[in-house]
Amino acid sequence: MKDFVVSLTAIPPRFDDLMPTLLSLREQRHVNIREIRLDLPRRYRRFAFDLATDLPDLPDWVSVRICETDYGPATKILPAAKDYAGEDVFLFYCDDDQQYEPELLYKLGTAAEAHPNDVISNMGYNLNERLANPCYDFPRSFQPRAKRRRKGWRYRLWRLRTGLRKKFAFVGTPGYIDVAEGFGGVLARPSFFTPDMYDIPEIIWTVDDPWLSGHFTKNGHGIWRPADTFRFAHNRGAEALADFVCQDHGRAEADTLCIEYFRDNYGIWGGDDPATRFNRDLTEPRRWNG
């Protein structure tokens, strides 16, 4: 199996709480990790930050990399993808407020070997499952689709037996999804990243999942989700972007703006079908299905 490069970013209010996440990444089994790196912008869009005094105190097995641009949450992977361009490695990116199971990288790497042209995502969703609008019920070119586990008594017994209390959209059948969610952990390759991914429009910089997933999709890479999500401990960090509002756009509105950006500019996610187009004020709150 190829070497892994593990990449994430963080914001100053969370610097003191990084070690549980970093330790869970260091303890990954059956894989060779070439680097665990924390990419930080020289100047944050949202926070005051002084390189001379505010860097986190971390062990020497974590590489702290300083980049010139704040890509928002996409800073977790864009600088690493640029540094490893042309190299034959797996790039794993994740959030800074999760603790990951010790065989997650091996699981995703195994799936990546079987799907060399695809991004592999531990968590994610299809737009029509998450968003309440008929425009997202479009034919998918990447097949087969991931299917949710039926929530009968066997599913509930499985949740009790595995200790899973929080309800996620567990996958009973592996397959393709529309959007990879970074908080669960995502595996890609350097060749999947293109220069236009670094030119993030205003407001859209606040939502990395649809931004990265849209580019992967328009570049011809499917997003594959293996069956059965690996468990991880979640501790919602300080100053979560889910609560952040940028120019009157909260998380849901920014997600919608990003999705429509790709539909309008690249024709993906049903955007090439006039029947799926719709006119509405994208600043209006959007209702989520789940």
Image (cartoon, rainbow, N blue to C red):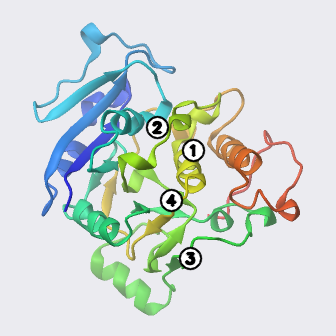
Name which residue type carries label 4.
Answer: His
Residue 193 screen position, x and y as percent: 45, 44
Q: Is residue 30 above or below residue 279?
A: below
Image quadrant containing the N terminus: bottom left
Q: Is residue 111 above or below residue 287?
A: below
Residue 210 screen position, x and y as percent: 58, 49
Residue sitting nearer the eye, 164 or 216: 216
Residue, x 51% and y 85% (percent of image)?
151
Q: Earlier in the sequence, mark 3 or mark 4?
A: 3
Image marks 1 and 3: residues in contact by CB distance under 8 Å: no
Q: Residues within 10 Å of mark 3 (few under 14, many from 20)?
A: few
In the picture of the structure, the residue carrying the numbered disc 3 is 143
Q: Earlier in the sequence, mark 4 or mark 1?
A: 1
Question: Which structural element holds mark 4?
Answer: loop
Q: Which residue lies most toward the left here?
A: 60
Image marks 3 and 2: residues in contact by CB distance under 8 Å: no
Q: Earlier in the sequence, mark 1 or mark 3?
A: 3
Name which residue type carries label 2.
Answer: Ala
Q: Earlier in the sequence, mark 2 or mark 1?
A: 2
Name which residue type carries label 3.
Answer: Gln
The answer to whether residue 162 shows anywhere in this view is yes
Q: Which mark is residue 221?
A: 4
Image marks 2 and 1: residues in contact by CB distance under 8 Å: yes
Q: Residues within 10 Å of mark 4 (few under 14, many from 20)?
A: some
Question: Which structural element holds mark 1?
Answer: helix
Image marks 4 and 1: residues in contact by CB distance under 8 Å: no
Distance of label 2 from label 1 (alpha carbons): 8 Å
In the picture of the structure, the residue carrying the numbered disc 1 is 211
Question: Which structural element holds mark 3?
Answer: loop
